[in-house]
Image (spheres, rainbow, N blue to C red):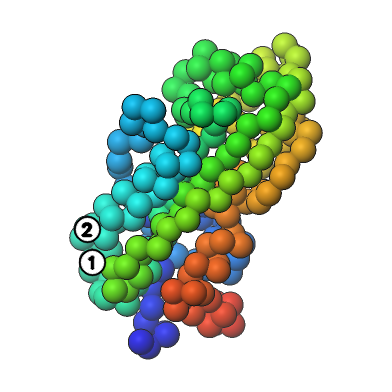
Amino acid sequence: MNEERVKLVLASGSPRRLALLEQAGLTPDLLNPTLVDELPRKNEAPRTLAKRLAKTKAEAALHSRKVQDLGPSRFVIAADTVVAVGRRIIPKPESIDEAAAALHLLSGRAHRVYTGVCIATPRNQLRDRVVETKVRFKRLSREDVESYLMCGEWRGKAGGYAIQGRADAFVRTINGSYSNVVGLPLYEVVSMLNGAGFPIYFNWFNPT
């Protein structure tokens, strides 16, 4: 495979995932967000949901005309992040009331953030894994919750908060990957790409 022709696709429209990839020295050649049904199945565990959605997004991206037009020498990264308290999945809130409910549930307790990552190789092989991080919030006051709701950071965020923003002030402890909570576990993504044959360090030395 000609390393200079290898392309990288991020199957996401998340500015956070893009920023994390770029932080690792990897600038995608194409952003290809995919629309999939993210509702969990009956009794589906959080880890299982994250893995299934990442794989579904990768498969959807592979069938995209834009991705196919890149030719055979391309890698696709897809990911999905799920926040849960025990087996209870906290969906992305669609209203301020749902965001408030999520924050009250997280207040003073530990929760887990699961990010499923799926990489499609040029041979259309799918490699996936789930990364788990444990996060504990302080007990949130009424002012904490109301102020955070007003700032609007909760919109579109798994669990109703953004750890890379103001919600970092709520975190008492974190056990595991910080970038995983943001939305893309960098250590695992780089390791997976490297193991699949993507020229990680070629991109470091030859920035676009």
Q: Marks 2 and 1, Cα distance to the nearest angstrom?
A: 7 Å
Side of 21 relative to 31 (left or right): right
Residue 180: x and y in percent read: 59, 49
Looking at the rendering, which quadrant does residue 66 occupy? bottom left
Kindly state the secondary structure of the residue where label 1 is placed: helix
- Number of callouts: 2
Amino acid type, mark 1: Gln
Say if mark 2 contacts mark 1, CB within 8 Å. Answer: yes
| Residue where numbered disc 2 is placed | 63
Q: What's the residue at 51%, 55% (across, down)?
A: 18
Q: Give the numbered dot on residue 143.
A: none
- Residue 135's place in the image compared with 140, above or below, is below
Q: Nearer the viewer, residue 127 or 142?
A: 127
Side of 145 relative to 67 (left or right): right
Residue 25: x and y in percent read: 58, 69
- Residue 42's place in the image compared with 202, above or below, is above
Q: What's the residue at 66%, 40% (across, down)?
A: 134
Q: What's the residue at 68%, 30% (across, down)?
A: 110
Q: Nearer the viewer, residue 188 or 103?
A: 188
Q: Give the numbered dot on residue 68.
A: 1
- Residue 160's place in the image compared with 114, above or below, is above
- Neighbour tally class for label 1: few under 14, some 14-19, many 20 plus, Cα within 10 Å: few
Amino acid type, mark 2: His
Kindly state the secondary structure of the residue where label 2 is placed: loop
